[in-house]
Image (spheres, helix red, strand yellow):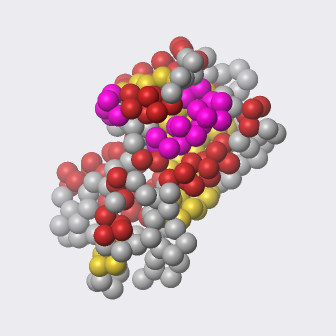
Amino acid sequence: MSPEKTAGVAVVTGAGSGIGRRVALALHGAGHRVVLAGRRAAPLDETLEAMGDTAGRALAVPTDVTAPDAVEELFERTVAVFGRVDLLFNNAGSFAGGGPVDAVTAEDWRRSIDVNLTGSFLVAQAAFRRMKAQIPQGGRIINNGSISAHVPRPNAVAYTAAKHAVTGLTRAIALEGRGWNIACGQIDIGNAATDMTSAMERGMLQADGRIVPEPTIDGAHVAAAVLQMAALPLEANIPFMTIMATRMPYIGRG
């Protein structure tokens, strides 16, 4: 099936910067109508500006993904403007909650879980509801996991726990979505070059205690991978995809 036939209405969270912005631009370029969600309006407006002449095919909705009412408003506006939801790139996240296991505060733990797990659930749930109810029924949800959904970095217990849990969320949605023509998959990204990952090239703490610079990849490669997942017809799904810098310390990390 050609990309033209699969282009529809896509919601992208965390669309004001980094991977979210790259994926939103790629989806728009592929013909999708794109709804941009993020905490702050100004970065979303910058993404809109980067799209150029959107011809009514893009909408920015400032959204706190940890707030149920805000998430519902995001999808209500999406349906009101574009009529349906065909694709969700569930991308919003934060590295909050770092530090040794015995030093992470309860507040930092909750902040990380709220953004990386609860936020992912609330957004996926709201998308699922619309996809189940709309005609034609169905859609696709792509959760942004992480290499940390597989193996931890030192001093990242909250982020690691949240991202491991996102894998469970993906599996549960993929299972329950079968009866409603809803496909759910996860992309696990390793060392994509963004503002959030700029420290990697300067040096990251390794399991053996060394500080070692790590290679990164251009976010365009991640966007291309998401487009590949999104372009599939709903009878096909990529449950899990890992994309990473070839030489990053993941295979054999320890």
Magenta region: 20-43
Question: Can residue 34 be seen in the rendering of this structure?
Answer: yes
Classify residue 242 by image quadrant: bottom right
Q: Does 114 sit above or below residue 137? A: below
Above or below, comparing residue 34 to residue 77 in the picture:
below
46 left or right, relative to 97: right
Q: Is residue 137 covered in magenta? A: no
Q: Is residue 108 left or right of residue 34?
A: left
Residue plotted at (18% across, 58% down): 105
Which quadrant, please, contains the N terminus?
top right
| Residue 240 point in image, percent of width and height | 62, 57
| Number of disc labels | 0
Viewer can see residue 85: no
Residue 109 to residue 44: above or below:
below
Could you say which quadrant of the image residue 140 lies in? top right
Q: Residue at (76%, 40%) from the top-left corner?
A: 233
Q: Which residue is depicted at the point 27% across and 48% down?
A: 111
Q: Nearer the viewer, residue 232 or 106?
A: 232
| Depicted 245 relative to depicted 46: above or below | below
On the image, the x and y values in percent for residue 174 come to 64, 47
Please provide percent x and percent y for residue 137: 71, 27
Query: Which residue in the rendered view is the most extreme toward the front?
Result: 52
Residue farthest to the bottom?
208
Which quadrant, please, contains the C terminus?
Answer: bottom left
Task: Using the image as rendered, state which of residue 49 and residue 249 is in the foreground.
Answer: 49
Q: Report if residue 23 lies within the magenta region.
A: yes
Name of the residue lying farthest toward the top: 80
Q: Residue at x 36, y 59 (%)?
A: 197
State the image coordinates of residue 88 (x, y, percent, origin top left).
56, 37
